Amino acid sequence: MARKAEGPTLQRDPRTNKLITQFRIAGRKYRRSTGCTDKAEAKVEANRIYKEELARATKKLVGNPIIAELFDQWLDDIDGTVSERYWTTQAKRTVFLAERFESVSDVTPHAVREYIKERLKSVTATTVRRDLVPLRQCLRWAFDEGLIDQPPFIPLPKKRARGTRAIDTRRVGLTDAQVESLLRALPERTRKGHPVRDLFTVAWDTGLRHDGIFRLEAGRHFRLDRKTLHVTKDIDKNGYERELPLTDRAYESLAAQGVDVGPIFQRWDYRKSLRTAAKSLGLDPDDLKSLDMRDFRHAATDDGARKSGHLSGLAYMAGHTDKHTTSRYIHPRIDDAREVLNKRFPSNGTPSGTRTGGGEGSQ
């Protein structure tokens, strides 16, 4: 027996102060913003939204549903059940997929393989697999909801497929000396007034991800009376909440922005300023083309490993919940091998008990 529809209720969103309506139709939960702060106006709008969704659900998509419409419904259904970052990422991917596949009947194994071939010319196989996540999940959801007869088979790139790595994804290996030279070469501010040197000082000294740095807020993550950063779950990729110690200059760089409440650094395209300053380091031209803040994070983690060898501390600083991830940021060099040999064999001679060649029984 089908479940009855449950009428709309109102709930105020503490972030926007606007009223949200919630209701169920055929067991499916709906959550929509009325866009109103007045309760009487919100009630009228809630009833309109409810009737509209009820009519759509009663009519139901049959035959050959439009992919874009399925994506919209699927995204509405998972909203609030997944992280905001995940939802936003999938929503962006659905835009391109809806342009490629108009309806469910267009999603054939051959069409998907053609899409994969085309995408592999510009991105890696890993990226293509991620591209197809919302398509696979949405069609499985549509089948479970009774909107399509069965989910189409969606092939994935073959295991041996590698695709094309874009130039801007190339990581640039920087030494601590290079980074410090680069910080000195950066202007205090860009021509438009952006604090580029302070930004990269914080990036280098903390090793935070670039997105997390741009989401730092005064009063919430940074306070003048503390020499630490409070990293909250919502600004960390892994949701790793923690207190990070600050160097004196990182503290001064944050304090110098003079922000009492709200974002400390405004987002802007810093790459031109960074790459102009980096020319003095004599980097490879291809490295200059791809140099960005992510390289500072890699360099910071690698530098920390060389100077401390404290894997747990590095994982904590970097926000890694798995230490194996931290190890991938460490880039061995020949000097590391020499240091290992010097510690194993301090005299730098032939270890005792080691054959030097010849002699009875040698092969």
Image (cartoon, helix red, strand yellow):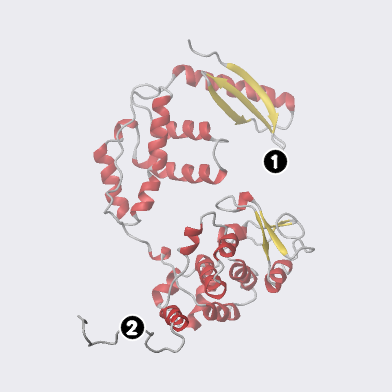
Task: Work out whether residue 64 or residue 332 is closer to the camera in this orientation and state it.
Answer: 332
Identify whether 347 is placed above or below 249. below
Image position, residue 138 (x, y; %): 42, 34
Q: Left or right: where does residue 48 sit relative to residue 74?
A: right
What residue type is disc 2 on?
Answer: Thr
Image position, residue 176 (x, y; %): 54, 78
Q: Residue at x 21, y 85 (%)?
A: 360
Q: Residue at x 35, y 56 (%)?
A: 124
Q: Residues within 10 Å of mark 2 (few under 14, many from 20)?
A: few
Q: Left or right: where does residue 138 sit relative to residue 176?
A: left
Task: Work out whether residue 289 or residue 306 is closer to the camera in this orientation and state it.
Answer: 306
Numbered disc 2: secondary structure: loop
Spatial CA span between label 2 and label 1? 71 Å
Quarter residue 264 falls in: bottom right
Identify whether 335 is placed above or below 217. below
* Residue position marked by numbered label 2 in the rendering: 354
Quarter residue 259 falls in: bottom right
Task: Work out whether residue 269 or residue 141 is closer to the camera in this orientation and state it.
Answer: 141
Quarter residue 84 falls in: top right
Image position, residue 18 (x, y; %): 70, 34
Numbered disc 1: secondary structure: loop
Identify whether 106 is placed above or below 249. above
Q: Residue at x 65, y 55 (%)?
A: 242
| Disc ID at residue 15 | 1
Circle count: 2
